[in-house]
Image: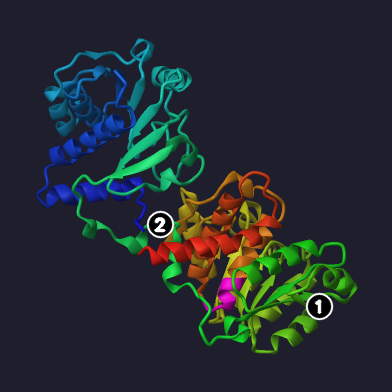
Amino acid sequence: MHELLTAEEMGRADRITIEGGVPGAVLMENAGRGVADEISARFPDASTVALLCGPGNNGGDGFVAARHLLERGYRVRLGFDGDPAKLPADAAHMAARFKGAVGPLGPDLLADAEVIVDGLFGAGLARPIEGKLAALIDQANECGAPIIAIDVPSGIDGTTGAVRGTAIGASATVTFFRRKSGHLLLPGRLYCGAVRVVDIGIPAPFLKPSLTPSPMSPACGFPRFPGPRRRGTKYLRGHALVASGPMDATGAARLAARGALRAGAGLVTVASPRNALAVNAAQLTAIMVREADGPQGIAALLADPRKNAFLIGPAHGVGEETRAMVLVALKAGPAVVLDADALTSFADDKEALFEAIRAREAPVVMTPHEGEFARLFGDVAGDSKVEKARAAASRAARPWCSKARIPSRRRTQAVIDANGTPWLATAGSGDVLGGMVLGLLAQGMSGFLGASAAVWMHGQAARIFGPGLIAEDLPEMLPQVFRGLERDRAQG
């Protein structure tokens, strides 16, 4: 697992490396050669490559790539506006070393090109692309030739993933040292294609990993992932409790309960209002059902210390009773997962929720979608979803897991899921995710690692199933997810 960097952090790593004695020209040479290597590997039979070079170091990388491609026998068309001698020093040096023809940036550059290399702007772009360059980007996107982006596709903010005016739609992106958060955050992720990371000679110790988000992978949580013990029993794998909604809204709780059971919890019980007992019992087999009306009913169930993880919120209803049940749960001993209506119920009394969370030591994980996040944390500052996630986790003093797939804990760490898929955009998939988090907490995982692992598993389950996915399919894919993990472990 490698860290992700913001554009500012990448610039700092560059500066420290250069101050430590590695010339900037060496870093640029390595970067440009890496781009040429990617093109040679992907398009060995291509003849004409068009390179679009901008006014900064990204353009310098393009000049290096053009030189290497020319030496390898490609027909190179390089477009650059202005005086190459006025580029930043290292880029100007690389422009002087390129012996091919340099023409203006324009649509003629794209005619009959078999490959286009985007070296217009890098990760630190902070203003919208407009005018002639915006038109050129649109023409490049429409011409049909594959585009290889240098660092990030031009027009994408490397930190936030935002589109600045318009953006290159790349077939692949070659970036340097580490991926940037904008490679994974939407909408930037949709413009990057496959992302390859090239080592350009920056030493890893220059990183401060605790302050950078990390891409989601099994490595986030699975070294500590709980597995069954040889002499273990179901009681050692935790007892998860899910609060059901009223009689006409019980399905979400059952989806969550199934997610918890498939995620490995030894026992799962649905805490059901009396008027929903029959409908819940008729739909459940391995999952138990117990009556629990109102806060007193939840308190009675949670008085049993064996019930060590509790989820409330899916289709539970917004209002005073839900608020009271949440506060009862937070005063009890188990790990707590708060989702959906359990969060919205505190939209007008956020501090009451945060104070109750801060007063306990046991894990609490919140799993809001963007609307629920806005109701609780609409005023948090941050230029990107990652910064807002960190700020929200800091305010609540607990980790949380966004349905935008960004688990975070306070300001020190966040992870961005690289495993999501559009097939997850189906009713009830978020309920299953909450249940999976619950099942991992019941087995003793920490809030942050449990949320991170559950998000990865959720995406992997959807990828395994593929087209036609509905929420009920997700728990049933988890055995295949676990088999894949065991296979990977066995292979080292």
Marking on residue 213? 2
- In the picture, the quarter occupied by the C terminus is bottom left
Specify whether residue 440 is painted magenta.
Answer: yes
Label 1 environment density (alpha carbons within 10 Å; few <14, some 14–19, many ≥20): some
User: Residue 288, percent across and down?
Assistant: 76, 78
Range of magenta residues: 439-444
Q: Residue under label 1, please give it.
A: 294
For the point 31% across and 51% down, the residue is 9
Q: Residue at x 71, y 57 (%)?
A: 472
Determine the image quadrant of residue 414.
bottom left
Q: Is residue 169 left or right of residue 25?
A: right
Q: Magenta stretch mostly in which secondary structure?
A: helix
| Kind of residue at disc 2 | Pro
Do labels 1 and 2 touch, CB within 8 Å?
no
Disc 1/disc 2 C-alpha distance (Å): 40 Å
Q: Is residue 29 rendered to the left or right of residue 8?
A: left
> What residue sits 68% from the left and 56% below the top?
473
The amino acid sitting under disc 1 is Gly
* Of callouts 1 and 2, the N-terminal one: 2
Q: Is residue 80 above or below residue 402?
A: above
Q: How is the image coloured?
A: rainbow
Q: Is residue 147 above or below residue 242?
A: above
Circle 2 SS class: loop
Let me know if residue 43 is in the magenta part.
no
**Circle 1 SS class:** helix
